[in-house]
Amino acid sequence: MQNNKKDPTIATIGEFGLIQSHFAPLCSSKKDIKVGIGDDGTVLSLAPELELVVSTDTLVENIHFSSSDNPYTLAKKSLRVNLSDLAAMGATPSWYLLNIATPPTTPIAWIKEFACGLKDDGERYAITLTGGDTTSSKGGLVITITVMGQVAKNRALLRSGAEPGDRIYLSGTIGDSALGLAYHLGKLQIDNPEDAAYLLNRHMLPEPRVDLGLQLVEAGIGCGAIDISDGLRADLQHICTASKVGAEVDFEKIPLSAAAKRQIEHYGDEVIKQIITGGEDYELLFTYGGDVEKIATIAQRVGVAVTDIGVITAGEGVDINRGGEPVELGFGGWTHF
Ligand code: ADP
Ligand code: MG
């Protein structure tokens, strides 16, 4: 991150100054928060007919983001990748915890921008900070967010809900984020500046499909569901493993943005591999055996395109076919080790 030696750093305000001035104001006084920031733990009230869904994700400097990335956008992304997990479970976002390990040299201006991003998206997705932990780091910055959401009893959407004969549905478009990242890292040249900006934005600022997840639960659609963080192929495989089924996907039906299509036209098969295995799309992938019209109505209501890309089978594994031929991908998707 940028640090002009004269800028005040968090070392000057300390751990408690940091929490008090920048994080505590993000805790709203919603009535279901009995105790917010400031005690040893937060106390939250739950309605008896609801279940709590909890999920956590960590973003590490130099693995998930670069030190030069905009802190406002980084804060939003940290929250959004977590919100995407709640979306995939069909849960209503409620509260979150923020654990941050940060070098003492971090400028206060950076923290202000970061907190501003959290505030804006906290309001946008109606989710409130209720606690966390703050430590110094001798390495880079590490941000862990833990989200909590609520869903009606026994109604959470699970990876294990897919059945043979179900159609496979995908929200939005995939591949944009992987192409945006490749561009950001200087590994892909994109000549059209509008395409470059669009793809980069899809990487930096994903749209968690919270409303879509909620509507699927609301409509009583029992389905297998996952959000795409590791790539279409890998995440569909996760549904197949959990549900003990297979999947057949028609490559031609996979929804792609105009910008991604132009990269395929330009670069061919190498780009196709990135699109299917690249990850960080944060779209919802779900399976459903019922009326297609029901899905179309929901898609229209939430204002997100939902595309049928294939079928769940009684077999095993994920087959992606293009003109009757399997698409050769070489590897499965993003893994850390
Ligand atoms: P303890 O030492 O009892 O664990 P801390 O000093 O770590 O307590 O935290 C004091 C309060 O500040 C707690 O309510 C905690 O949840 C909150 N807190 C600490 N760090 C953060 C953070 N990064 N974001 C939000 N709340 C935080
Ligand atoms: Mg603590």
Image (tube, rainbow, N blue to C red):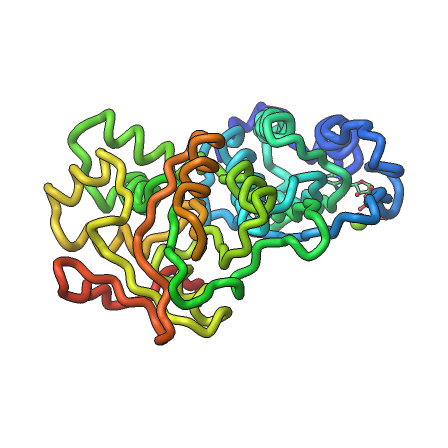
Q: Can residue 68 be seen in this view?
A: no
Q: In this view, does 319 lie above or below 40?
A: below
The percent coordinates of residue 275 (x first, y second) are 27, 50
Toward which corner of the image does residue 173 lie, by quadrant? top left
**Residue 225 or 82: which is nearer the viewer?**
225
From the viewer's perspective, tell me whether residue 181 is left or right of residue 50: left
Q: In this view, does 311 lie above or below 200?
A: below
Q: Is residue 14 above or below residue 253?
A: above
The C terminus, quarter of image: bottom left
Q: Residue at x 31, y 40 (%)?
A: 180
From the viewer's perspective, tell me whether residue 295 is left or right of residue 135: left
Q: Residue at x 85, y 42 (%)?
A: 45
Q: Which residue is drawn at 17% across and 41% down?
A: 263
From the viewer's perspective, tell me whether residue 38 is left or right of residue 240: right
**Residue 331 or 37: which is nearer the viewer?**
331
Q: Is residue 205 visible?
A: yes
| Numbered disc total | 0
The percent coordinates of residue 174 (x first, y second) are 33, 45
